[in-house]
Image: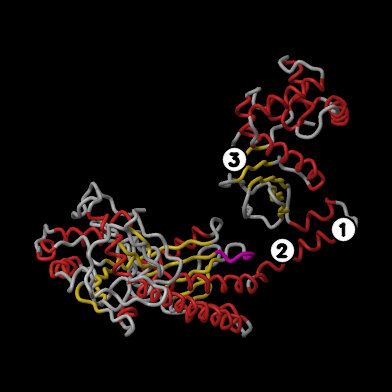
Amino acid sequence: MSETESSVSGREAPVRDRAAPVRDRAAPVRDGEAPVRDQEAASTRDAETSSAPSPAAPGPATPGPAAPFGPAAPPVPLAALLARDDLGLRQVAGERASPAPVQWVHTSEMADPYPYLLGGELLLTAGVHVTPAMADDSSLDGSLDGYVARIVAAGGAALGFGVAPVHDTVPRALVEACDRHGLPLVEVPPRTPFSAVARAVWRLMAEARHAELRRITEAQQSLATAAARPGPVPAVLRRLAAQTGGWTTLRAPDGAVLHEAGSAPSSGARAALADLSGIVRGGPSSATDTVEGTRLAAYAVTGSDGLVLGVAVAGPRGEPGDHGSHGSHGSHGSHGSHGDHAIAGIAVVLLSLLTAERQGAAEEARSAALVRLLLGAEPAEAAPLLGPGPWRVVHAYGEGPPPTLGTPLVDAAPGLTRYVLPSAQEVAPQPGWTLGVSAPATPEELPTADTQAARAARRARAAGTPMALHRPAGLAALVDPEEAAAHARTLLAPLHGPLPETLRTWLSLHGNWDRTATALTVHRNTVRQRVARCAELLDADLHDPDVRMELWFALGR
């Protein structure tokens, strides 16, 4: 960042030796606080001699930011700053009906601050770069018109102009330029340091954050009370609609609306919410969009096998999902939608608990099967309680929440998740996960299917593919399994630690060092050392195809 650019947080840039001359009407000095305006004038002397581009209207060669970075705190309505008597701010030009809220405060004396703006700023300046000739040039191609156009193109929320020490009044050309471009222009009196404006913004943000936390806490209590009433599911939806001021729905797995509450939005928004619910079902846990000025959100109700909560809240332009402007309009802003998401999340938890009874019969059957197994029953005796077979076993390797795969029979462990599901159910690759799928198996064959899934997953990881299916044994099936296992144990006995897995991966990739290193996430030299160690311990020539075939057969047992 340029030495003439700084984000205001109560401290300004240090005074430099080449300070610009200032007037006697500098800001008053508090104990322990340097004169802000004097520092501004001093720190921006370099800006007048820098190579910063001269302001110009934005054109195709200067793309604007794709979107502003999200603020860490709720935005502050400009009217809230103007209403503070201690600041004495006065709007003299620009949009007055619905100005964009302030997301942060920034000071700059650059002739073109565009590269340093993220969007949503109240940009403060003492006008050091504004010469008398510029102040009187109100033409459309004047320097100040281009200066304002650049701020608007960057998504700036407002411009604050400090009166004194450089200028006694706000330049007329700047007032007219802000009116033309709709950028709110605020006059900052000499008695108000820029740091005081920044502190006021941060305090207002903190107050808004505390108010939102109180709102979420009250909503949590209200939703919990609704969940305890007769007809709890409709009661929760009604309370959620009241808390968000929108329309709430609970949809069945086939998309039909089971319950709804609140005022329904436009037909287009309703259709879009139905589409959004379809995306969530079997996919991500939530999804959002904005259609016809209405914020839409869909949430998967966990444990309900396809139920989806939908929320539609009418919101002003510029809130999340509206890609049409850089700044949010209205006092609620993006933080209001964040609070709505938190409240909807509470409702999702309650609905998950309330709708669990829809799975009561299946849960009871699974519990009965587990009890029978614990009490010594054979798998063939317990399996019919889970539904018709045959079954498949799936091994999934990855990080994060495991995919559901449409079955409740899941054994999740760090890095590996195992599934048992009907063989007729299709298994599809899952983003970020590597899957191994067994052949169809009867209840008695499930342990064998588990081994098949493990082998298929190893093959998929070695080959770098998202999913692999079990392949029939082929010629290996001609050998007695017990004899083959005994031979494999004898042959591979000298290998230990990571050596068997390294050798298996290396053989599966036809001796390719780089691909083996990638599959094992180790350095290629590590692979070379391990394979050489295997050859030494086995006293075998690993370049001999007969040796490779025998080892591959043994490693597959």
Taking the spot 81% from the left edge, 63% from the top edge, the residue there is 368
Asked where in the image residue 483 lies, by quadrant, the reply is top right
Relative to 521, 254 lies left or right? left
Determine whether the residue tagged by mark 2 lies in a helix, strand or loop: helix
Quarter of the picture containing the C terminus is: top right
Residue count near mark 1 (Cα–Cα under 10 Å), binned few <14, some 14–19, many ≥20: few
Asked where in the image residue 74 lies, by quadrant, the reply is bottom left
- What is the x, y in percent for residue 225? 60, 84
Q: Amino acid at mark 2?
A: Ala
Residue on which disc 1 sits: 374
Residue 302 in magenta stretch: yes
Residue on which disc 2 sits: 362
Magenta-colored span: 300-304
Relative to 403, 333 lies left or right? left
Of badges 2 and 3, nearer the viewer stands 3
Residue on which disc 3 sits: 466
Taking the spot 29% from the left edge, 79% from the top edge, the residue there is 191
Query: In terms of depth relative to the viewer, which is nearer, 355 or 173?
Result: 173
Residue count near mark 2 (Cα–Cα under 10 Å), binned few <14, some 14–19, many ≥20: some
Determine whether the residue tagged by mark 1 lies in a helix, strand or loop: helix
Q: Amino acid at mark 3?
A: Pro
- What is the x, y in percent for residue 442? 77, 45
Asked where in the image residue 528 lies, by quadrant, the reply is top right
- What is the x, y in percent for residue 496? 81, 32
Of badges 2 and 1, nearer the viewer stands 1
- What is the x, y in percent for residue 502? 72, 30
First along the sequence among labels 2 and 3: 2
